[in-house]
Amino acid sequence: MHATSRDALAAVREQLAPESAAEVGTELFSVVTLLDSERGLRRTLADGSTDPDARSGLVGRLFQGKISDATLAVLTVVVRQQWSSARDVVDSLELLGREVLLRSAERDGQLDTVEDELFRLGRIVAASPSLERVLADRSAVAGQRTSLVHSLLDGKVAAVTSALVTQVVERLREEPADAFDALSTLAARQREQSVAHVRSAVALSDAQLERLTRTLTTTYGRTVTVHVEVDPALTGGLVVQVGDEVIDGSVAGRLDALRRRLAG
């Protein structure tokens, strides 16, 4: 996203009501779906050479009575900004929808649950190539993938988790496991925390997990949420990834490093 669009997104966030209901998030997703299918409309709404009043007026005529007043207000602010491209408008609406849903989960005291469910779903999908292939099958009708998601999640996860996962699958642009991990990270950022993805050769005890969390929080100078995945292939030790930084303390990692040194 270019600087112009980043500035526009920041301006929208400043005007977005922090108490926006989850309904706003799901309705923004519906607008995203429409704009994905209507190239001419999204280009018109992102055309910075036209009068902002004309763009916001068009939004009012198209969406009044079809979405809530709160969602219409957000959409109006969005189209009045200057954007680098029509695609940035749509992607920003998607991101805003996700952020609104996560804030609603935070207000309901469910943000920890949503973050954990998203992370665990990412691990389940990553460990099941057949499931990931089905979810990533772009030749299938989006509704078929959505039906699969509902059959897997309905009644088993928080409503916000289900809404986020459904939207990701409907508008899939990366591998499903990566998309769910990105959502989990976004949930952590909602609490101004970092996420450490940890692979361990064995399951960690509560005391070990607490010690690791405390160590990482001290190391990075901010609260770190730790998600652990058991990976017997490591033989022993841990691999910790925080953002782009990877700390490989596994036996397998040390053996690989030794082999590289011996190979010259």
Image: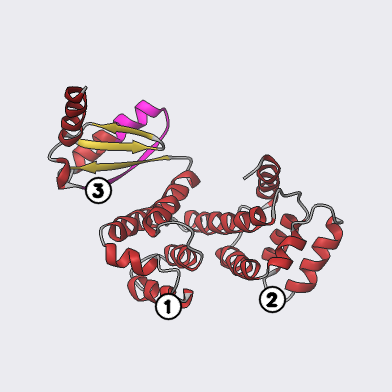
Residue 114 spot, x, y in % from top left: 40, 57
Q: CA distance from mark 2 to mark 3?
A: 43 Å
Q: Which residue carries the number 2 mark?
A: 66
Residue 28 locus on image (x, y percent) = 61, 64
**Could you say whether the residue bearing mark 2 is in a helix, strand or loop?**
loop
Residue 198, x across and y down, in percent: 28, 41
Q: Are marks 3 and 1 in contact (CB under 8 Å)?
A: no
Which residue bears the numbered disc 1? Answer: 144
The crowding category of the residue bearing disc 3, from other C-alpha atoms within 10 Å (few below 14, some 14 to 19, many at least 20), is: some
Residue that protrudes farthest toward the left in the picture: 235
The Cα–Cα distance between marks 3 and 1, rounded to whole angstroms, is 29 Å
Relative vertical location of residue 211 with respect to residue 184 in this rendering, above or below: above
x and y, in percent, of residue 222 in the image:
42, 32
Per the rendered image, the range of residues in magenta is 213-230
Q: Residues within 10 Å of mark 2 (few under 14, many from 20)?
A: few
Q: Which mark is residue 229?
A: 3
Closer to the eye: label 2 or 1? 1
Question: 18 and 95: which one is in front?
Answer: 95
Mark with earlier residue (3, 1): 1
For the C terminus, the quadrant is top left
Residue 52's image quarter? Answer: bottom right
Q: Is residue 19 visible?
A: no
Task: Give the colour scheme shown.
Answer: secondary structure
Residue occupying image coordinates x 16% and y 23%: 262
The residue positioned farthest toward the front in the image shown? 264
Q: Amino acid at mark 2?
A: Lys
Disc on res. 37: none
Q: Quadrant of residue 221?
A: top left
Is residue 57 rendered to the left or right of residue 172?
right
